[in-house]
Amino acid sequence: MTFLLTLISSSATTVKACYQMSDAIEGYVYWCEEWEPKPGLTVTAYRITHNGEPISPKIEGTDVTDEDGHFRIEKLRAKGEWYKIEVSTDCGLVLEKEVQVFCGETTRVTFHYCCPEPHTIGYWKNHPEEWPVDSLEIGGVTYAQEELLDILWSAKAKDATSMLAAQLIAAKLNVLNGVDSTDISETINDADEFLSLHPLGSNPKGEDRRYALQLKDLLDQFNNGS
């Protein structure tokens, strides 16, 4: 009984006891295919203030989801502390939730995500209301949405810059919409550089035309999800 009274009256002892009780955050990560478990994703716990600002030391713990999508991060600071839990997904999305951890308790968190799918030229020109922006820079020139729609609708195979610009617009909209750009970012930069040297409507010939069409085809594959 004396020990219990001492524990209750001493905040330092209480904190130590909380550590010994291994306060934890655990949960599961699922992805779109009928809530299928997602293994191999890194989960990080950051201790934060009530307004979301990090407290040093920033990272309190990490874990990697197992074959069941399960993770567990233990030995956290307790007594009502707040944490931001981040999950880095396989398609560039970062999932976040803020939770409060109490002494001697396990806080449970569940994440469910779907990777954004790329869309084709046809989708973007028929769904302007879904655009994440109302202007884009193409080949060093900034175009408003109405001008970009004109480029998409009037794209012609005869002029390689016309088709390249249309595919570049769609690719940039897909990236801004959350599609992972890891495998296409270099091609996007190359297309921008080409169109800055060969402006829209310049109708390049020979090797320049062949190169433009190569870039166009790579962007087209990305926009079609292949």
Image (cartoon, rainbow, N blue to C red):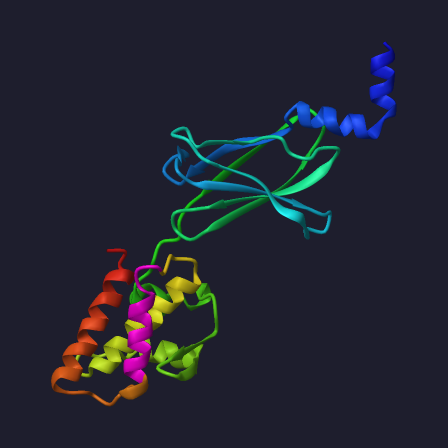
Percent of width and height locating residue 202: 24, 90
Q: Is residue 131 visible?
A: yes
Residue that sits furthest to the top in the current view: 1
Q: Is residue 216 left or right of residue 61?
A: left
- Front position in the image: 170 or 79: 79
- Front position in the image: 56 or 136: 56
Q: Is residue 23 left or right of residue 226?
A: right
- Front position in the image: 2 or 102: 2
Asked if the magenta segment contains residue 49, the reply would be no
* In the image, residue 108 above or below residue 202: above
Residue range corresponding to the magenta coloring: 182-195
The quarter of the displayed image where residue 24 is located: top right
Asked if the magenta segment contains residue 185, the reply would be yes
Q: Residue at x 44, y 66 (%)?
A: 131
Q: Is residue 199 visible?
A: no
Q: Which part of the image, by quadrant, shows the N terminus?
A: top right
* In the image, residue 192 above or below residue 226: below
Percent of width and height locating residue 137: 41, 79
The quarter of the displayed image where residue 128 is located: bottom left
Q: Residue at x 38, y 57 (%)?
A: 179
Q: Is residue 3 left or right of residue 172?
A: right
Q: Residue at x 18, y 72 (%)?
A: 214
Q: Residue at x 37, y 76 (%)?
A: 149
